[in-house]
Image (cartoon, grey):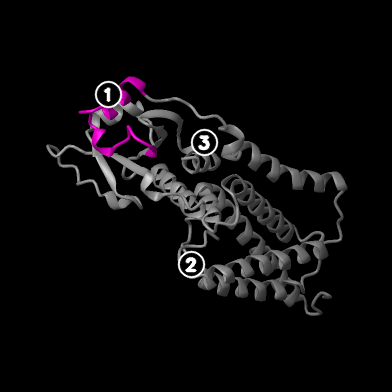
């Protein structure tokens, strides 16, 4: 599309182009600040594994950053135009799929900055496309940056994102035994505070969670999607939460914080077992802990293999 003949229209188109670029930059930034939820949102569609969801979330953010930079800079116009159209089309097709399967939760397009469902987000993309089509009448700059400047522009956000917010499976591959083995053994033994859960027989996934803890809620979502997508026995997933102190004015703990019923354990024992760290997830076979995880190293394959071998 050639630039508009009218100077005011060219200026308006350039302003629209830059505002659209800023929108994509803000959208990418919002996803970065709420990256954990964005990863789980992608994982919840049962298309990608947990590890691939980590990678896909970052690729989407990098693409938004690069398109945003391209629009704001008003350089490499044809290439940026093609990328913008392809990205908006891909996002809209994904949102249409989400709407068709009945998803009404936030699409995470703007992270937690703006909660918007897939149907409304499709309308948002249509509006963005209209603004973009109008912005194509802007006059591109005559300056042509050297190739190494473009290389820096591409590599800077990509490398920064993968270094400062590396995927969990890059940093936390090994399970860690960060719990009190002696106190846990007492709790699951006959007469112990967890003996009624029947952990001494069979295989179970036991999660220590705290209501109000954002990472505990995210861990709950991860495990819920894992047993649903892998068709695992959901009764093998057991949640334990601190019982609270009725002698204080604290509000009653609401087990509805999580998607499964929770067993209440006295605060002191809970703290002793977990050393105050939460969430903590254990793979237990006949009362013995085989693996333990915190939020960052929850391993989908380990949980799947552990329960399916039974």
- The part of the image, by quadrant, that contains residue 126 is bottom right
Query: For the residue labelled by badge 2, is the local secondary structure a helix, a strand or a loop?
Result: loop
Give the numbered dot on residue 186.
1
* Residue under numbered circle 3: 297
**Numbered disc total:** 3
Between marks 1 and 2, how big is the CA–CA gap?
A: 44 Å
The image's mark for residue 276 is none
Which range is magenta? 180-206
Q: Of the residues under marks 2 and 3, which one precedes in the sequence?
A: 2
Q: Do the residues labelled 1 and 2 touch (CB within 8 Å)?
A: no
3D distance between C-alphas at marks 2 and 3: 28 Å
Residue nearest the viewer, comparing 86 with 200: 200
The CA distance from mark 3 to mark 1 is 26 Å
Q: Mark 3 or mark 1, which is nearer to you?
A: 1
Image-based side of 265 in relation to 17, left or right: left
Mark drawn on residue 103:
2
Picture coordinates of residue 218, whole percent (x, y): 44, 47
């Amino acid at each position: 599309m050639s630039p508009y003949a009218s100077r005011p229209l060219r200026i308006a188109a350039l302003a629209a182009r830059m505002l659209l670029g800023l929108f994509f930059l803000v959208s990418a930034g919002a996803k970065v600040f709420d990256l954990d939820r964005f990863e789980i949102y992608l994982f919840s569609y049962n298309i990608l594994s947990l590890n691939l969801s980590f990678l896909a979330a970052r690729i989407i953010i990098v693409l938004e950053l690069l398109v945003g930079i391209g629009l704001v800079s008003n350089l490499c116009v044809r290439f940026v135009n093609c990328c913008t159209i392809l990205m908006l089309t891909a996002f809209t097709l994904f949102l249409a799929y989400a709407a068709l399967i009945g998803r009404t939760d936030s699409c995470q397009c703007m992270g937690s900055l703006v909660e918007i469902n897939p149907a409304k987000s499709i309308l948002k993309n249509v509006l963005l496309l209209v603004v973009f089509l109008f912005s194509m009448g802007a006059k591109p700059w005559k300056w042509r940056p050297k190739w190494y400047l473009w290389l820096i522009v591409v590599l800077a956000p990509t490398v920064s994102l993968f270094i400062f917010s590396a995927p969990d499976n890059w940093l936390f591959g090994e399970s860690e035994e960060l719990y009190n083995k002696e106190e846990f053994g007492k709790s699951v033994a006959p007469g112990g505070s967890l003996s009624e859960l029947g952990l001494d027989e069979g295989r179970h996934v036991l999660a220590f969670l705290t209501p109000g803890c954002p990472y505990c809620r995210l861990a709950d979502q991860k495990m819920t999607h894992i047993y649903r997508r892998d068709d695992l026995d959901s009764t093998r997933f057991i949640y334990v939460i601190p019982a609270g102190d009725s002698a204080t004015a604290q509000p009653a703990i609401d087990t509805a914080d999580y998607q499964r019923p929770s067993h209440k354990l006295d605060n002191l024992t809970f703290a002793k077992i977990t050393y105050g760290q939460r969430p903590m997830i254990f793979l237990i076979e006949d009362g013995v802990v085989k693996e333990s995880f915190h939020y960052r190293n929850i391993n989908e394959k380990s949980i799947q293999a552990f329960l399916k071998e039974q």
